[in-house]
Amino acid sequence: MNIRTLALATLVSSGALALSQPAAAANVSTFDDLALAPDSYFFPQTSTTFTSGAATFNHSFNDWGGDCCHTDWVYSNLTDTTTEGYLNQHSAIAGGGAEGSANYAVANIGAPVASFAAPVSVLGAWFTNSTYAALSMLNGDGFAKQFGGASGSDADWFMLTITGLDSFGQSTGSVDFMLADYRFADSADDYIVTDWRWVDLSALGTVSSLQFALASSDNGAFGMNTPAYFAMDNLAVAAVPEPEQAALLLAGLALVGAVARRRMV
């Protein structure tokens, strides 16, 4: 029996901790808890937020001449993996949600954030490219180059960075995920992500929010040429134990240590 188990057993036997207290379970932002008609997406023409699981996501609308442009987050269940260009900006190249689900989220960089009402321990999420970005990198378009160039040997890349922020807005660390990478010595290893990939975010620790940023090897006078979109699904976090629970566990550890020392005398 390890020290943690001994501590919990001591607390239970003393009545300090009830056996009925459940262990912290993952809380997952599936986006399937949000109502959405088939083959559609959430795109209100106003700046607002929406919540799935433990996370709240920001959505920004810019009216630059009618039904125009969003930044930050939308959620979608579109399945179009073949239509190129801006008019298909809300589809995931995987053709649906992660793990067989329908709904998923798509971000367009402005400043997409996932925020939490209380600090959480972040576990991870599934990520893929949007159809718009994936086909732009594969074939090129009027603004962005074809990744690899005409020869296929250009060292192009497209990277997502996820940064954790604590309750004071300070970084807890960051995790990079390559959405495309053409930097390999053997061009057969070059890739554009077209399926859902799990990204372990546990290194970010306890966070109050997550920020997301994109960077690309393809840049011009006005910034990044690669369409600044990615898709995410099933963001999983776990509740952080309340201070009282942590204090009880520490007390149990101290008691176990005292008992062990007495037995050694």
Image (cartoon, grey):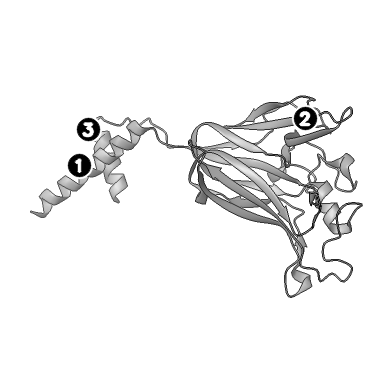
Nearer to me, 218 or 265: 218
Q: Secondary structure at mark 3?
A: helix
Left or right, 75 with respect to 116, comes to right
Q: Residues within 10 Å of mark 1 (few under 14, many from 20)?
A: some
Dot 1: what SS?
Answer: helix
Instruction: Pinpoint residue 206: horizontal percent, then vertical percent.
Output: 47, 42
Q: Alpha carbon of mark 1 to alpha carbon of mark 3: how far?
A: 11 Å
Nearer mark to the viewer, of 1 and 3? 1
Q: Is residue 1 above or below residue 30?
A: below
Q: Measure how far apart labels 1 and 2 are at the Cα level.
A: 57 Å
Q: Amino acid at mark 2?
A: Phe
Q: Is residue 42 visible?
A: no
Residue furthest out toward the left: 265
Image coords of residue 35 (percent x, y): 73, 26
Q: Nearer the viewer, residue 63 or 73?
A: 63
Q: Which residue is mark 2?
A: 61
Residue at image location 11% in from the left, 49% down from the top? 262
Which tag, 1 or 3, sits closer to the chain's start?
A: 3
The numbered dot on residue 58 is: none
Residue furthest to the bottom in view is 185
Q: Do tag 3 and tag 2 residues touch (Cβ < 8 Å)?
A: no
Along the polypeptide, which appears first: circle 1 or circle 2?
Answer: 2
Q: Locate residue 260 relative to residue 172 in the image: left or right.
A: left
If you read the primary sequence from the N terminus, does the residue marked by circle 3 or circle 2 appear first?
3
Question: Label 3 near label 1: C-beta < 8 Å?
Answer: no
Q: Position of residue 133 (x, y in %)?
A: 81, 50
Q: Which residue is located at x 65 percent, y 55 percent?
A: 177
> Amino acid type of disc 3?
Ser
Kind of residue at disc 1:
Leu
| Residue 255 - label | 1
Kindly identify which residue carries mark 3.
14
Query: What residue lies at 75% left-to-right and 60% top-to-bottom?
Result: 217
